[in-house]
Image (cartoon, helix red, strand yellow):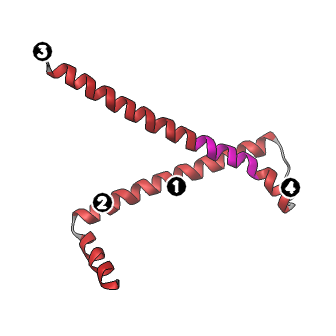
Amino acid sequence: MFDIELLALVALFFIFIYLFYQGVKLLMKYLVIAVASAIFPFVLIKFFGVDLALTWGTIIAFVFLGIFAYTIYLGLSFIEKIVKGIIRLFGGGKKEEEKEKEDE
């Protein structure tokens, strides 16, 4: 009546939906970063008077630079979460909580 394969398929389906949702969210963030990075050279020239040759190559370079910087940021934040988890695992988080209580 209710077998394990059906349960596993339903679980995999929900995992797929969750991962797809997270991927779409990440893609949207990358699109926002790309658009902001593409607009940045125009802002530099228009408002700050920077003498910059505005070509397709310049715009693409700023887009790549923005995407690269955001990817580095995501990687470093991921590493930070892992390190904080390891520190909490070995009892380092208790000392920080006690210090916060003493400061209050």
Q: Amino acid at mark 1?
A: Tyr
Secondary structure beneath dot 3 equals: loop
Q: Are marks 1 and 3 in contact (CB under 8 Å)?
A: no
Magenta stretch, main secondary structure, is: helix
Residue in front for this viewpoint, 34 or 7: 7
Which quarter of the picture shows residue 34? top right
Residue at the (59%, 53%) spot, across then down: 69
Which residue is label 4 attached to? 46
Which residue is label 3 attached to? 1
Question: How far is mark 4 from mark 3, CA to CA?
Answer: 69 Å
Q: Are marks 4 and 2 in contact (CB under 8 Å)?
A: no
Question: How far is mark 2 from mark 1, CA to CA?
Answer: 18 Å
Magenta-highlighted residues? 30-40
Question: How far is mark 4 from mark 2, CA to CA?
Answer: 45 Å
Residue 100 appears left or right of 45: left
Q: Is residue 41 magenta?
A: no
Percent position of residue 24, x then y: 50, 35
Residue 43 appears left or right of 63: right
Which residue is label 1 attached to? 73
- Between disc 3 and disc 2, the foreground one is 3
Q: Of marks 1 and 3, which one's residue comes earlier in the chain?
A: 3
Question: How far is mark 3 from mark 2, CA to CA?
Answer: 42 Å
Residue in front for this viewpoint, 96 or 87: 96
Residue at the (69%, 48%) spot, across then down: 37
Which quarter of the picture shows residue 89? bottom left
Q: Of marks 4 and 3, which one's residue comes earlier in the chain?
A: 3
Q: Amino acid at mark 4?
A: Lys
Percent position of residue 56, x then y: 79, 40
Q: Of marks 4 and 2, which one's residue comes earlier in the chain?
A: 4
Which residue is label 2 attached to? 85
